[in-house]
Structure formats: C-alpha cells, structure tokens
Image (cartoon, rainbow, N blue to C red):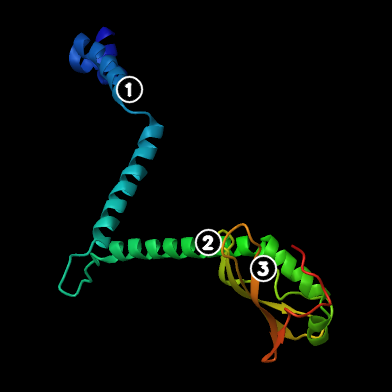
Amino acid sequence: MLRSILKSPLVRSSPMARGGVAAAFRAPITATTKALTAPPARWQSTAAPVTQNIFREDHQQKQVKKPMTVNTELPDPLAEKRKVRLQFCCFVICVTVGFFMIVNYEKFSSPIIGSTMHFLRRSDKVKEVLGKNIDFTSAFPWISGEFNQVKGKIDISFKIKGDNGKIGVVKLVANRPNKSVPLTIDEWSVTVDDVKYDLIDDDSAELVN
C-alpha cells in the first residue's frame, strides 16, 4: 500500500518528491524572494509611458535642430546696439518734451498772463473783432517766445478766440532795466485775419498789475 501511495500523481508532482526535502523548502523561499523584489504593479504601469515620453521628446528635439548651412541666416550682431540706441533716443525725446511742457506751464500760470487775459476779456476792441467770451484756443495753450521775469525780458505770443469763431494772435513785448521799476510795454497787439490791432492805447479796460 505504501508503494501505491508513493506512485500516485500527487506525490510525484510535489516538490519533495522531485528534489527531496531541500527542494521542498527552497521553493517557498524563492517564491517569497521574487514577490519582495518585484516592483509594484502601478510602478510598472507608469514607468513605461514616462520612458516613452522622454525618448519621444528627445527625438523631437533632435529633429528640430537643423544643421547650419551656407543659406542659414546668421544673427545680426548689431541688433542689440540698435535696440539700446532706440531706447536712448526715446528717452531723450520724452525728457525734452517734458521739459518744454513744464516751461510752458510756468508761462501759462504766471500773473502776467493772467493780467493779460483779464484785459483782453474786457477790451471793447477785442470784443469787436472776436466777439464775447474771450479765452485761449485750447485747455493747454502753447505760449511761445521768451519769458524771463527775473531779467525783465518778455517777448511772447499766444492764440485766443471768441464767440464769432475767429482766431486772434496776441503779441506782448515788454522789458525793464532793473527790478526797481515796473515793466515797460513796447508792443501789445492782437492780429485777426492779418489785421493788427494795437492794444496799448485801448482805454476800455484797465490792466491789472
């Protein structure tokens, strides 16, 4: 009976029957070692796509980089210098425009310009040629010419308008030899349609000092 048991298929297929006792104990240990050293399934599923993406990106970069030939356009070595010069020119233009705007604002806000406009708004001669509501032609008028109150030299001109739509150009020239004496008006006129009207002898309004 023992002989029949040993000859059965189950006993022959067992590890102990194939390799003895050592083989029977070695089989579980080998299976356990493989289970511990094998990477997790999720690592195996994600490692392959990442590796493929890296190889694909490297391959695409190698395809983009073309070899330099005779027909390849070379970079301009003076491009950076031209850019710096352009920026410097823009800076100089902005500073210059800002300087003239500040100087013009000082002229516009001076008491002499305020007194001049006060006289023009009340002058009958100016109202006759320009109409009522005498004012500057714009909110920020440009006053051209020399305007130096410290040295006592004034030679300015600016534009005014009235209700009738005409434009007049006011001319004021005055000077003084020293600070102890008031300004002496040499020319004070308004020109409308190429006709000059003298305002020095206009007694219809008083000049506010």
- Mark positioned earlier in the residue sequence (2 or 1): 1
Element carrying mark 1? helix
For this view, does 135 lie left or right of residue 48? Answer: right
Distance (Cα) linking label 3 and label 2: 14 Å
Q: From the image, which quarter does the N terminus lie in?
A: top left
Distance (Cα) linking label 1 and label 3: 88 Å
- Mark positioned earlier in the residue sequence (3 or 2): 2
At label 1, the amino acid type is Ala
Residue at coordinates 70% horizontally, 69% vertically from top-left? 139
Residue 11 in which image quadrant: top left
Residue 208 in which image quadrant: bottom right
According to the picture, the residue beneath numbered tag 1 turns out to be 35
Q: Is residue 128 above or below residue 22?
A: below
> CB of mark 3 within 8 Å of CB of mark 2?
no
* Relative image position of residue 72 (x, y in whole percent): 21, 71
At label 2, the amino acid type is Gly
* Label 3 packing within 10 angstroms: few (<14), some (14-19), many (20+): few
Residue 206 visible here: yes
According to the picture, the residue beneath numbered tag 2 turns out to be 98
The dot on residue 140 is 3
Q: From the image, which quarter does the C terminus lie in?
A: bottom right
> CB of mark 2 within 8 Å of CB of mark 1?
no
Q: Is residue 153 above or below residue 179?
A: below
* Label 1 packing within 10 angstroms: few (<14), some (14-19), many (20+): few
Residue at coordinates 21% horizontally, 68% vertically from top-left? 74
* Relative image position of residue 167 (x, y in whole percent): 71, 84
Distance (Cα) linking label 2 and label 1: 80 Å
* Label 2 packing within 10 angstroms: few (<14), some (14-19), many (20+): few
Closer to the eye: label 1 or 3: 3
* Relative image position of residue 148 (x, y in whole percent): 56, 63
Residue at coordinates 84% horizontally, 77% vertically from top-left? 204
Of residues 40 and 177, the one nearer the viewer is 177
